[in-house]
Image: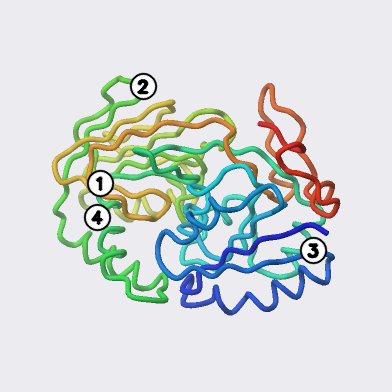
Amino acid sequence: MSKVQLIVNPIAGKGHGSAVVPALEARLRRLGYEPSIFVTQRRGDASAFAASLDWRTSLIVVGGGDGTLNEVVNGQTKIPMTIFPVGTGNAFAADQGLRGTLEAFETLLETGVVEWFDLGDAGGRKFINMASGGILGRIHQAFWEGRRGPDGFVRCLRIAFRILRTRAFTPVSVWCDGILVTRSAWLVVVGNTRTYSPGIRFTPLASPSDGLLDVCTLPAPSGLDYLRWFLRALRGRPLNPNGAGYTRARTVRLTGEGVMCHVDGEFIGPAPLSVSVLPRSVPILVPASRRVVAPGRTDSIRGADFLLAGTNHARALSP
């Protein structure tokens, strides 16, 4: 019987993390798995616990959002993982078509595939979705400094509008593969995946399997720029106002006095920040419709082929 480890953030998505545990456990047992449950108490718990797991665990299921998934990725990258999305943003789940219902979860276990995903490294902190600096870093700084318990998207929007109204923009300098791209970016997103948050894509051409990071830079806005950019992001189109940039690179460096940064929605502090890609670094169970096709890659492994058999993941998977 395959062991499935649930790592649950109880305050994710207004406390939905705790609410889904009994149903997830019951569904896993009915499907023939042996579930274990770990509930985080504070930031860092998910990373520390994930690092303690060994080959006896066949799959990690993250019950939380992008922040909890980020912690698990920073704890270990050998055991296959997936996410049951119950967080505030759920950007990775939206990008990969992962839904937070028991029916979708069962289908994922039965028909999903394990793919090797690129990761980013931002000053020693791994990320799966994006790193960002500038105004978005300030918004996430305010969000995390004021968080006291279960939270939601509405408070994040209130914080964003409050900071945007100040129009106090700190310029960010950006180097891509050692070449200076701009000294006056207001917003910088370094994307490993397409989705920044559900429905919003600053890096709509990004692929988590191409060994590159997509870099979007935007200048300080004026007039109706906010609205135009927001509408283009909602439509999944590259943002292209005057002074904007979109490129791909293996290494990116952000600098600037007072520039704040975050990775996967987690505030990490001020610039300078050095970012690099870590090709094919973590195995993730995703829907078969999201199967990655990349030059020189090996075939995906259907999740059920090794999960129910209790296959040693270290032998069954190789990047």
Earlier sequence position, callout 2 versus callout 3: 3
| Disc 3 crowd, CA 10 A, few/some/many (<14, 14-19, 20+) | many
Mark 3: which amino acid? Tyr
Mark 4: which amino acid? Arg
| Residue found at x 82% / y 56% | 110
User: Which residue is at the front of the view, 216 or 303?
Assistant: 303
Q: Are marks 1 and 4 in contact (CB under 8 Å)?
A: yes
Distance CA(mark 4)–CA(mark 3) = 43 Å
Earlier sequence position, callout 4 versus callout 3: 3
Per the image, the residue denoted by label 1 is 134
Per the image, the residue denoted by label 3 is 33
> Which numbered tag is attached to residue 214?
none
SS under mark 2: loop
Per the image, the residue denoted by label 2 is 177
Mark 1: which amino acid? Gly
Earlier sequence position, callout 2 versus callout 1: 1
User: Which residue is at the front of the view, 149 or 191?
Assistant: 149
x and y, in percent, of residue 108 in the image: 75, 57
Q: Are marks 2 and 1 in contact (CB under 8 Å)?
A: no
x and y, in percent, of residue 180 in the image: 26, 23
x and y, in percent, of residue 99 in the image: 65, 63
SS under mark 3: loop
Distance CA(mark 1)–CA(mark 4) = 7 Å
| Residue found at x 27% / y 35% | 254
Per the image, the residue denoted by label 4 is 138
Q: How is the image coloured?
A: rainbow
Front of the two marks 2 and 3: 3
